[in-house]
Each structure stands twice: as C-alpha cells, then as structure tokens.
Image (cartoon, coloured by chain):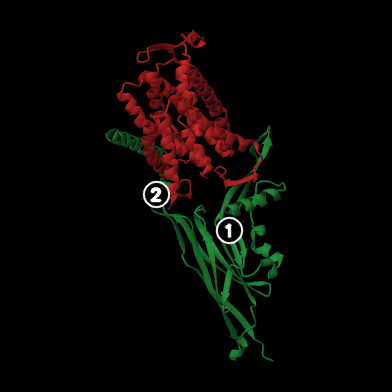
Chain colours: A red, B green
Amino acid sequence: MQIYLPIAEMSMNIFVLFAMGGGVGFLSGMFGVGGGFLMTPLLIFAGVPPAIAVATQSNQITAASVSGAMAHWRRGGVDFKMGFVLIAGGLVGTYIGAMIFTYLRSIGQVDLMISLIYVIFLGSIGGLMFVESIASIIRSRKGEVVKVVRRQRSWIDRLPFKMRFRKSKMYVSVIMPLSIGALVGILAAIIGVGGGFVMIPAMIYLLHMPTKVVIGTSLFQITFVTAAATYLHSINTQTVDVVLAVILLTAAVIGAQIGVRVGVKLKGEQLRILLAGMVLIICTKMAYDLVVEPTELFSVSALDGEAN
Amino acid sequence: MISFVRAETMITDLSQHEIEITSQFSGQELLLFGAIERHVEGNSLSEEITVQGIDYDIIVVVQSQPTELVIRKKENVAGIWLNKANHTIRDIPGYYVIGSTRPLNKFLAQEKQIEYGLGLDNLKFTSDSNDDITEFKEALIRNMIEKGLYLESDGNVTVKNEILFRASIAFPANMPIGDYKADVYLVKDGDIIINHRTDLLVDKQGLERFIYNFAHEYPPYYGIIAVLVAISIGLFSGFVAKKVS
C-alpha cells in the first residue's frame, strides 16, 4: 500500500516505512540510543530528499526522547540545572545550525554536509567504541580488572564562570556544558540527530558527571533541542513532513519496546560492538559515495529545493 | 473542373480534467482521446471523402506550467565528489510528455518541431547564463526522464478507423502540482493543420492539501503543531509502555 507524503511530495510504501521505523526503533531500544543517526541515512538511502529526512527526523526524535526523559525524571535521573545550561547552549546551536542548514540547502550542499559530518563524527566515535569494546572483551577474557583512575585536574577545571550543580555534585565552569550543548544543537539542526552519541561521552569524559544522571539529562536536553530544530526547519525551509514523522515514530515506539527486551539479554560489550559495527558500515557507505565517481554527475531540483 | 475544399475539425478530451493527489496517490494514467472529422464542401458526392490512406499524423503533448529548475554538476574537489557548477533553467515544464503516431522526423520538418517546441530536444526554456550549457540541458532531460517526469514516445498514439485516436498518459507520484495543458496537433502533409488544447489541473486534496498548505502558509504554527504532535505521541507511548511492562 502506497502513501503519499505531502511535504516530501512523493509516494512511498507504508510497509517499508513501518519496517524502517520499527527496525530503527528496535535497535534504539536494544542499544539505548536515539536512533536518529540510523534513521536519517536510511531515509536518504530510501530516496527521501536529504533536507526532508533531516527536518522530519528532528520531529521524530522529540517524540522518542520525551518519554525517555519522563521515565528518567521519575527515577530522579535528570539534573535539571545542568539540563537547562545544556539547553541554553543547545538553543543557540540549533539556531546557528538551522541557519547553516538553510544556506546549505540554497546552494545544494545539504547532502555533502550530512555525509561529511557522519563520516567524521560517527566514524571516529564508532571507531573508538569498536576498539574500546574489543579491548574490554579481551581484558575480561584474560581476567584483568580495570583500575579506576582518579581523575586528574585538567584545563577544564581552570575555566571561569563556575556554577554549582547539586544533583550532579559538581562545581564546574558553565562554558563547557554550554559549548557541548551548542555543538549538539548544531548537529541536531544540520544532520537530524539527537546528538546523544556526542553529548553522552562528553558528559562522562569531559564534565565527569555521575553516570546515573547522564542519560536522563541528555534526553531532557535532546527533547528541547530537537523541538527547537523542528520549529526552525518548519519556518526556514518547510521541510518537516508530519505524516512521515508520525508513521516512523509509531513504528519506532513499538520496535523500541521489543528492542529493550532483547537488549537486556545481551552483554554490554556485545551490544557496543554491534552498534559500533553498524555505525561503521553506514560511515563506510557514505565515505564510499563521497570518493567514488558517481554514475550520474548531474542532479535536478526545484529552484529553492535541494537535489533529490 | 470542380475543385474540392476539404477541411478537418478535431475534437479532443481527457478522461479526467483534474488529478487529485490524496494520501493513497501513487501516480495515475489518463486517457487523451479524440476524433477527426472530415468535411467536403462544394460537392455532394460522397465517394470523394473516402480513403486516402493514413494521411494524418497526431502528436500529443502534455506539460505542466513553466517552472524553474536548478541543475547541478558534481566535480571532484580534493578527492571528494561535490556539487559545484550549477545553472538555473527558467520557463521549463516540470512535466513534459510527448507522444505521436510515428517518429516525429518521419512526418514533420525539423523547423516545425522547433517552432512548436515539440520533442524533448526542442523544449523551450531560458537560462541564466550565456555560456554553452548543452551538457547541462542534456543532463536535465536525462534526469527528468529518469524521474518519470519527461517522456518522448512515438507510436503510443493509436488511431482507429482513421478518425478515432487515443493516447495513454502516465503521471508519476512525484509530478508537480499546478495547471497542465494537453495539446493535440493534427498533422497532414508535413503541416500542423489543427492544434487543440485541453486544460488539466493537478492539485493535492484532502489532508495532503491541508498539511501542505498549512506548512507553507503558516510555518510557525505548523512548527508548533508538529512539536506538540510529537510530544503527545511520545508521552502517550511512554504511558502505554509503562502499562504494558
């Protein structure tokens, strides 16, 4: 059965969309990740114009993260003060990102930017994750115990404008969380991801936040930032396809519930290797498309649209 | 010596004058059909109007209103293929399908084809550049054919009993909305003797139309509603998931 998407102005098979949404939802439930970084490329590979894929993804991630944020909040897993600082940075970043996105779209470079950011960001994070989880598997086979290293004071502690975050039991400069938030906002607006894959490592390794509030606080920030991105894309480029978003997120919600149940049966390292492997496959495909001469060098688009 | 003045009239119509794009829309086919009438004046002898063999040819052209398209070319910059050179082509249809009884060159002179803008090679347009953009024009046509928006086919107009003709026209789901025109040309002895036009309107309908118009006319409200829809579905699913688990 075909369904016509009013904003994308194309007809797609509704079962294919359900399968995509459900599949990504399953993986995001299993790995505990947002899934935006899987869905955006998947939509583009399926023929959805990149700009529509990105903006619609922002809309979908809002839905996916709000329920997670609520769940963590009930368990006391959200540091609201830190969350608001991250959001403040995030909103500025989203605004800048949406402007960059509008400009890129007008010069037909949205695809290029998505590919480059994916290859660089996801490639390096996926690579690190892959190496790290293999190392930890080897360590656990040898029976070694990882020593907990007391964290060293670094340049981050010397930054000015310090603020106390009671929930996280931290006293740090707001410059760091503001910049992390802003970077995530820019990414959210340009490539249609939540940005958890950047924010969570940054919160753990740069801010040294306690793990129990990391995921909840990041989901809290992602909800607001992707909502802002959806709003700005709607205003700037009219590329948010609500019909596409609702179909994908309905399927994703169901998939995620199944994914969570499967995920608890797997070991942490195995999950991370699987996830890293998937990220690397997507990056390889994107990198390949960037460097290999395309069979069709030309692309046609409407004057204000992007190549599709 | 009695001279005969023969004249033809033609009537044409489309099986539908409006295409409605609804949520289940996945493209559509329309039938363009018509009849040729032959009149013989100044003579009442009926045998004079009988068979001359197939001396008529018919061309049908269906096209959307002129639009603006950008054609971009990828070039290799530092090992990466990216969009570089581009040209804006104006006054070009976003949908153009031409069909005929036989290959155009067999019955219509090149000059006539150019004059009437018949055939993909003779499409009329204006461009932003004075450079030679032949390569871009060819690529544009190639891309549009690939998308199913341009088509040139001879032999898809069938004529029955030398008076009735029909052609099936395919519209893909990604066709542009707006006013279309369907032209039928009757060609005899290398001359276009009749040109008849039928209008066609392509528009989104129902929810598709509402969503599209709302998004383009009230972007801030559309944005807010998109966010609210997402948040309510998200909260609702979280609620259901809690109940289920």
In the displayed structure, A279 sits above or below B53; it is above
Q: Is residue A98 above or below residue A12?
A: above
Residue found at x 63% / y 50%:
B140
Callouts 2 and 1 on one subunit: yes
- A108 sits to left or right of A26: right
Q: Are dots 2 and 1 in contact, CB under 8 Å?
A: no
- Relative side of A255 to B153, left or right: left
Image quarter where the C terminus of chain B lies is top left
Name the quadrant of the N terminus of chain B: bottom right
Residue under label 1: B96
Q: Amino acid at mark 2?
A: Phe
Image-quadrant location for residue A66 = top left
Q: How many marks?
A: 2
- Which element type, helix, strand or loop, lies under badge 1? strand
Q: Can residue A181 be seen? A: no
Residue labelled with disc 2: B210
Residue farthest toward the front in the current orientation of the protein:
A142
Q: Secondary structure at mark 2?
A: helix
> What residue is drawn where x is 60% and y is 59%?
B151
Quick check: A181 above or below A254?
Answer: above
Q: Nearer the viewer, residue A33 or B100?
A: A33
Q: CA distance from mark 2 to mark 1?
A: 27 Å
- Residue A260: x percent and y percent? 37, 32
State the image coordinates of residue A140 (x, y, percent, origin top left): 47, 19
Q: Amino acid type of disc 1?
A: Tyr
Count residues near mark 1 (Cα–Cα under 10 Å), then give few for <14, some for 14-19, many for 20+.
many
Counting residues from the start of the chain, the first of labels 2 and 1 encountered is 1
Residue B54, given in percent of the width and then of the height, sits at 64, 78
Where in the figure is residue A301, as x and y percent of width and height?
57, 46
Residue farthest to the right? B132
Judging from the image, mark 2 belongs to the subunit labelled: B
Residue lying at the far left in this picture: please name it: B243
